[in-house]
Image (cartoon, coloured by chain):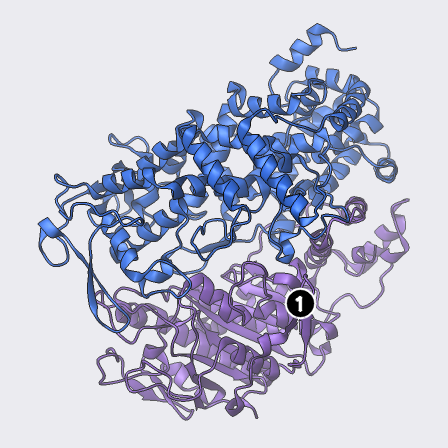
């Protein structure tokens, strides 16, 4: 019954609620008494609360056109490099991000083998190649799982995916699944249509039915269902849901992030970090540019990215949150150095770039390199596992953490990836 | 004792519980009905063998039993009647049975009652509409994804796809003919157009961009179980298919175009016309119309239409000489992969897992759990002239489909969720699809008001809320209808649940509440309707506490109880 307690439904005063609780009949239980504080305030969060924001570029971004330009080469395309506040140059269509590069580092020698969308998305999110016999937990589920221990006050899901689906919790179970929301912050079916007493009595009835079912040894999925019910109930009655309401931000803030779904998603991510959500993924799709790539980039994707991502980094820094927030920018793979007959680029996993920063990670660096045409990594290649290990380390998660999959196999966090040393401070 | 007159009443009355008089009658005989369930259970226990005289069912049973024995697995017992009835309703027509339908099944004391129920669901005209709707929705999701046709820029007309598929399933069109039509279709995507052909919607959005690579990968994967998307760009180390084969298969689609037709008043696409036109070839020689592709090392290569088994067709790009899609359709109809892929797809639909993982990959690198059975069922399907209903009957009447989902000590290891190769020694629990949930809730009172079109539009928008796109050109998507929080919120507070739990006069629950039966009987009705079982003593106890908390208002107490039943894990699972 513990999971029916703790929060006051929205729109109720505490006193009003206590009257209801006291007045409830045979269905009332002692745990309806309020055990601890109702609302978590941002300033009550522990100082060392770390979070991660993954900016996911669905479709496979052309990193040779963004972060590792090859001007003058046949493979280089039309974009010119510009200088930044960090020790590297980037694409001319990212001028605002250029001013934030002292906070961010580029890893230019990513080298992976999965050039199919599904497989690449899975691999980059989990650090494991797809295997039909086991589902691995994604970044968000792992980080949420590891960082939740100290966050008893968090009433909303610890892993939130804005504008996209992310990847699932795998063997960690549905309780660690991403909570997918759209970037407008409106969450469907949130409004409670019942008075709280009745809702609680319904929940108690439901719990009885659930417990009976779990008692029949129906496996972990049945237990996960019960956890999901609890999380849903918590969320419905939580003040922290305000964090989703990006509309409450000032006009200037909204303008700074840009009037795009991705911009609002990034702004929401900052608000969610402030209430203590450990992992937020924000989706920007549309990078699968097999045709007419440079026009699509310069007129649509890059301005959107430039505005929102630079705003996020700047905003987090000004709020002194950047040192506790790791930012990861990546897609499932890069794109071919060769520009194809349709003026597009195809899938390319052999050498490409990701961007990271914040937390304990060093900014302003370009780690690794590719050859003159961008066909091969010319320095130590890094994998999804290495990146994940580095990010986990940047969040203060021990790389010795080992999970046991459902079939009893031990699984090292980040699949035993090695740290990208240059990024360690 | 049920009189003849009453029995007739059961058979002829509508299968939706809408008639109050009927309700009253049903409730007044509830106790007898409950007893019948018990009788059904014990009769079943005495003769668990089902339909062994159907040769194809025997084929499945023999194969399964052989492998269970070999692996030392003891299969779970046969599932009890009401639960099995619920299972087969959900899988064949896409919703839970009504109380009336469960009762009809429970009171049948024929040892062939399961065969009779499967036969009713497949062939009785009263189920044709729901059967066709259910399978059309399933196949729409396979052919055009959950989001195909959902936005204004889409070239797909989702309604047109659904209409074509409903007609296929209502008339039990042979599967090979359906595939041939989907692969070779020409005409307009939108119903009402003069040259409307709903089958065109499968390829409408897959032929124009990137030289028809989506048509290539979707056609080979969905109908032949060949996963070739990786070989588009390079030879894949784990795939028998080479890049050459991809472009050879792709060559079959190069005469095909989707032409946009705009509405008069605006620049919105009204519909699309799928046509075949002469293909000049990338080298400009229509009589030898070739396709070029580039190898990883930059070397340009050439490809002509060649089927997966190596059969070449005439290289002419002139439609008048060689209609490439027609040729492809014929070659596909002759391929054994066509047979095996359908068997595997339907097996996975009914059993939760296919003979391979993933279900739509029959490549040589994929392990097959029951290779001989897959071959045999494929052959049997071909011999039946691709009768999909026959295949559905074979699977739903086979031994593994009768089994309980509860595991024992001797088949606990048979758990594909833990990575084991599925042996089907028990029924694998799975969550209803969003479509199954929707139709189940509609049938217990969630029906919205309005015309059929309005109701369909409402269903489509309800389903859309769970679809999330990945932002790739291949239209990859995921569903949040996966047991996570958005789904729980919908079940807690959504409109559909509010309607299904309404107790106003005329609603399902309202009628039940208004009937003269005693409260405990009504409680039993709720548990039976929702969970295909009776309430446990502790559940009866909390039901009476609810009645007390609602100050004796039975309708409100029933409402609370029904809400809890619908929100339970037990309800959402196909057991």
Instruction: Provide residue B439's location: percent of width, then percent of height.
Output: 57, 35
Q: Residue at x 55, y 34 (%)?
A: B59
Give the residue number, with chain letter if any, for mark 1.
A409
Residue A268 visible here: no
* Left or right, residue A386 beside residue B493: left
Quarter of the image with the C terminus of chain B is: top right
Q: Is residue B272 above or below residue A220?
A: above
Instruction: Provide residue A317's location: percent of width, then percent of height.
Output: 54, 84
Q: Colour of chain A?
A: purple
Instruction: State the blue chain.
Output: B
Q: Residue at x 20, y 64 (%)?
A: B301
Of residues B83 and A422, the one nearer the viewer is B83
Q: Is residue B41 above or below residue A149?
A: above
Instruction: Provide residue B423's location: percent of width, then percent of height.
Output: 62, 47
Of residues B208 and B279, the one nearer the viewer is B279
Quarter of the image with the N terminus of chain B is: top right
Residue B495 visible here: yes
């Amino acid at each position: 019954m513990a999971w029916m307690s703790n929060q006051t439904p929205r729109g109720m005063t505490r006193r009003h609620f206590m009257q209801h609780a006291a007045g409830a009949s045979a269905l009332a239980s002692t745990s309806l008494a309020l055990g601890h504080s109702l609302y978590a305030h941002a300033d009550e969060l522990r100082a060392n609360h770390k979070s991660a924001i993954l900016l996911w570029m669905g479709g496979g971004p052309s990193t040779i056109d963004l972060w590792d330009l090859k001007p003058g080469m046949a493979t280089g395309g039309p974009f010119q490099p510009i200088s930044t506040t960090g020790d590297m140059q980037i694409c001319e269509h990212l001028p605002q991000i250029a001013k934030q590069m002292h906070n961010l580092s580029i890893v230019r020698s990513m080298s992976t083998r999965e050039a199919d969308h599904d497989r690449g998305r899975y691999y980059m999110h989990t650090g494991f190649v797809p295997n039909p016999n086991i589902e691995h937990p994604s970044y968000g589920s792992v980080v949420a799982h590891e960082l939740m221990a100290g966050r008893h006050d968090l009433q909303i899901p610890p892993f939130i995916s804005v504008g996209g689906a992310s990847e699932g919790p795998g063997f960690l179970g549905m309780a660690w699944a991403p909570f997918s929301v759209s970037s407008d912050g409106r969450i469907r079916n949130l409004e409670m249509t019942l008075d709280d007493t009745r809702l609680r009595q319904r929940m108690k009835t439901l719990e009885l039915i659930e417990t009976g079912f779990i008692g029949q040894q129906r496996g972990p999925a049945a237990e996960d269902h019960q956890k999901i019910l609890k999380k849903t109930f918590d969320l419905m009655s939580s003040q922290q849901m305000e964090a989703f309401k990006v509309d409450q931000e000032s006009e200037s803030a909204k303008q700074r992030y840009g009037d795009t779904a991705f911009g609002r998603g990034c702004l929401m991510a900052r608000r969610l970090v402030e209430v203590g959500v450990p992992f937020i993924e924000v989706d920007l799709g549309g990078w699968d540019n097999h045709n007419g790539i440079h026009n699509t980039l310069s007129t649509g994707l890059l301005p959107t990215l430039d505005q929102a991502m630079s705003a996020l980094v700047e905003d987090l820094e000004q709020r002194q949150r950047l040192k506790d927030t790791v930012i990861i920018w990546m897609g499932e793979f890069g794109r071919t150095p060769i520009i194809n007959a349709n003026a597009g680029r195809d899938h390319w996993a052999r050498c490409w770039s990701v961007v990271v920063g914040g937390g304990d990670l060093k900014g302003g660096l370009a780690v690794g390199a590719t050859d003159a045409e961008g066909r091969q990594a010319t320095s130590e290649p890094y994998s999804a596992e290495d990146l994940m290990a580095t990010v986990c380390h940047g969040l203060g998660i021990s790389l010795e953490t080992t999970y046991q999959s459902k079939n009893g196999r031990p699984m090292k966090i980040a699949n035993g990836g090695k740290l990208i040393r240059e990024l360690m401070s | 004792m049920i009189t003849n007159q009453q029995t007739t009443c059961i058979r002829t009355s509508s299968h939706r519980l809408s008639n109050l008089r009927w309700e009253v009658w049903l409730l007044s005989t509830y106790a007898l009905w409950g007893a019948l369930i018990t009788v059904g259970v014990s009769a079943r226990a005495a003769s668990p063998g089902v339909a062994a005289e159907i040769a194809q069912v025997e084929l499945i049973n023999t194969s399964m039993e052989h492998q269970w024995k070999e692996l030392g697995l003891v299969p779970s017992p046969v599932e009890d009647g009401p639960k099995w009835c619920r299972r087969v309703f959900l899988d064949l027509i896409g919703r839970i049975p009504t109380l009336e339908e469960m009762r009809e099944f429970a009171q049948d004391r024929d040892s062939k009652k399961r065969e009779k129920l499967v036969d009713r669901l497949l062939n009785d005209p009263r189920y044709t509409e729901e059967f066709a709707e259910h399978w059309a929705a399933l196949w729409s999701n396979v052919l055009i994804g959950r989001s195909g046709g959902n936005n204004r820029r889409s070239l797909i007309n989702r309604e047109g796809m659904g209409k074509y598929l409903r007609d296929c399933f209502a008339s039990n069109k042979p599967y090979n003919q359906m595939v041939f039509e989907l692969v070779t279709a020409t005409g307009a995507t939108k119903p009402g157009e003069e040259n409307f052909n709903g089958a065109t919607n499968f390829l409408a959005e897959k032929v124009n961009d990137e030289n028809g690579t989506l048509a290539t990968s979707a056609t080979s994967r969905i109908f032949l179980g060949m996963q070739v998307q990786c070989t588009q760009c390079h030879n894949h180390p784990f795939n028998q298919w080479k890049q050459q084969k991809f472009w050879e298969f792709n060559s079959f689609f190069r005469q095909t175009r989707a032409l946009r037709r705009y509405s008069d008043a605006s620049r919105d696409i009204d519909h699309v016309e799928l046509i075949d036109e002469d293909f000049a070839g990338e080298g400009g020689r229509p009589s030898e119309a070739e396709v070029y592709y580039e190898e990883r090392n930059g070397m340009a290569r050439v490809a002509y239409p060649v089927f997966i088994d190596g059969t070449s067709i005439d290289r002419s790009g002139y439609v008048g000489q060689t209609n490439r899609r027609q040729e492809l359709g014929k070659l596909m109809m002759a391929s054994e992969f066509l047979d095996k892929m359908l068997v595997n797809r339907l097996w996975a639909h009914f059993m939760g897992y296919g003979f391979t993982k993933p279900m739509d990959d029959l490549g040589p690198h994929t392990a097959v759990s029951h290779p001989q059975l897959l071959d045999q069922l494929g052959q049997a399907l071909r011999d039946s002239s691709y009768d999909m209903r026959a295949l559905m009957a074979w699977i739903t009447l086979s031994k593994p489909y009768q089994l309980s989902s509860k595991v024992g000590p001797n088949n606990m290891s048979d758990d594909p969720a833990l990575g084991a190769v599925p042996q089907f020694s028990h029924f694998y629990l799975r969550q209803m699809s969003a479509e199954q949930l929707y139709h189940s809730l509609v049938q217990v009172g969630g029906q919205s008001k309005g015309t059929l079109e309005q109701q369909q539009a409402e269903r489509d928008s309800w389903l859309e809320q769970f679809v999330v796109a990945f932002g790739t050109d291949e239209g990859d998507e995921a569903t949040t209808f996966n047991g996570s929080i958005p789904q729980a919120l919908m079940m807690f507070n959504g409109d559909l649940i509010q309607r299904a739990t309404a107790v106003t006069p005329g609603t399902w629950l309202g009628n039940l509440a208004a009937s003269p039966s005693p409260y405990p009987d009504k409680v039993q009705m709720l548990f039976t309707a929702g969970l295909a079982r009776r309430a446990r003593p502790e559940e009866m106890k909390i039901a009476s506490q609810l009645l007390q908390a609602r100050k004796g208002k039975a309708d409100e107490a029933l409402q609370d109880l029904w809400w809890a039943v619908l929100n339970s894990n037990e309800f959402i699972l196909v057991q």
